[in-house]
Amino acid sequence: MNTEDISDLEVTTELPDLSISIEWKGRSVDLSEDVGAVWYRRPSKPYEFTEENDRPDEATLEYIQDQWGAWWESLQTLSGITWVNHPVENHRMESKTRQLHLADQIGFNIPETAITNQPSVIEDLYQKHGSIISKAVSAPLVDKQDKFVFTVHIEDSPEDAEGELEVCPTIFQKPLIPKIDYRITVVGDEVFPVKIETTDEEPVPLDWRTEKDHIQFTPAKLPNKIESLCREYVAKADLLFGAIDLVKHEQEYVFLEINPNGEWGWLQKPWDIPIAEELAELLIANDE
């Protein structure tokens, strides 16, 4: 189901003997009987990609989206289904604090971090390290502006920006520069690490997502301990899939974050990392 097209479905939920069925383009599926595994991939809302002039009025649109969202959430009542990943665990592991805390608990190195809007704390961290890294606490897409808030290296003292700093909590961290970046995609028990490099021998930007046109991803071999920690991390987070960002700094591997619903198409092609095949195998294995 493409959830942005979900309003084209005909759906019925019946109780007390729970039954959830859908009909679409002449095909009928009893979700309570015929589904054993679900790949939960970035669900959208009805009319989200519809031209504004073709949408219902704002109040009606909000009502429709709320009702379909509630129906979608009701699918979690189905028993015996493997979710990749379960929506509750997916949402829970979006928390940057929870991510870093779990990484620290299981034995990863993590950067010294303060999540704060208190200028004195930020200034102390800056003075301690001579500069600081700043990143958003939550999914940093600025709505209706199509702007993504990337990681920033703050090299000037933040003491003159107190009013801006107090607006909301922000993540501030010890800078790990120079560094080598790694993206590790975990699918079930399989671990796919890649090393992130530039195509022109220039240093990789602080946030490599800002320069994807000049970036290449090379399959890499991690130390056994780090690969095992990646696998353990995803399992302890109650996930079956996760995209982990690590850096190597001063010969130590440091955990930065995990995206429990991370993109991977740009690794599959053109870098030939077989993530799609492994996801398919995982879903098939859990649907039997």
Image: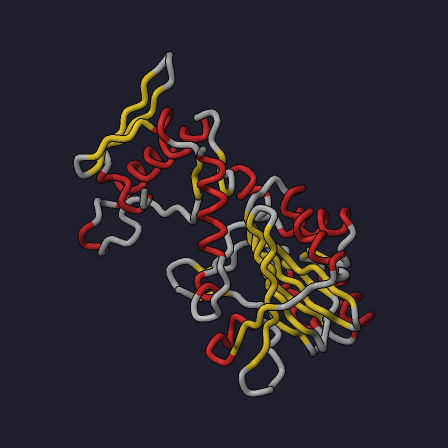
Q: Position of residue 93 (x, y in %)?
A: 59, 45
Q: Position of residue 50 (x, y in %)?
A: 24, 53
Q: In this rendering, is residue 41 above or below 16?
A: below
Q: Quadrant of the C terminus?
A: top left
Q: Residue at x 64, y 43 (%)?
A: 235
Q: Quadrant of the N terminus?
A: top left
Q: Nearer the viewer, residue 95 or 186?
A: 186
Q: In this rendering, is residue 258 above or below 248?
A: above
Q: Residue at x 49, y 42 (%)?
A: 84
Task: Give the side of residue 63 with respect to residue 175, left or right.
Answer: left
Question: Can you name the residue that lies furthest to the top here?
Answer: 16
Task: Give the side of residue 168 with respect to residue 255, left or right.
Answer: left
Q: Quadrant of residue 110?
A: bottom right
Q: Position of residue 260 (x, y in %)?
A: 55, 50
Q: Nearer the viewer, residue 210 or 162?
A: 210
Q: Residue at x 58, y 43 (%)?
A: 239
Task: Give the side of residue 288 with respect to residue 101, left or right.
Answer: left
Q: Position of residue 232 (x, y in %)?
A: 69, 47
Q: Residue at x 43, y 39 (%)?
A: 38
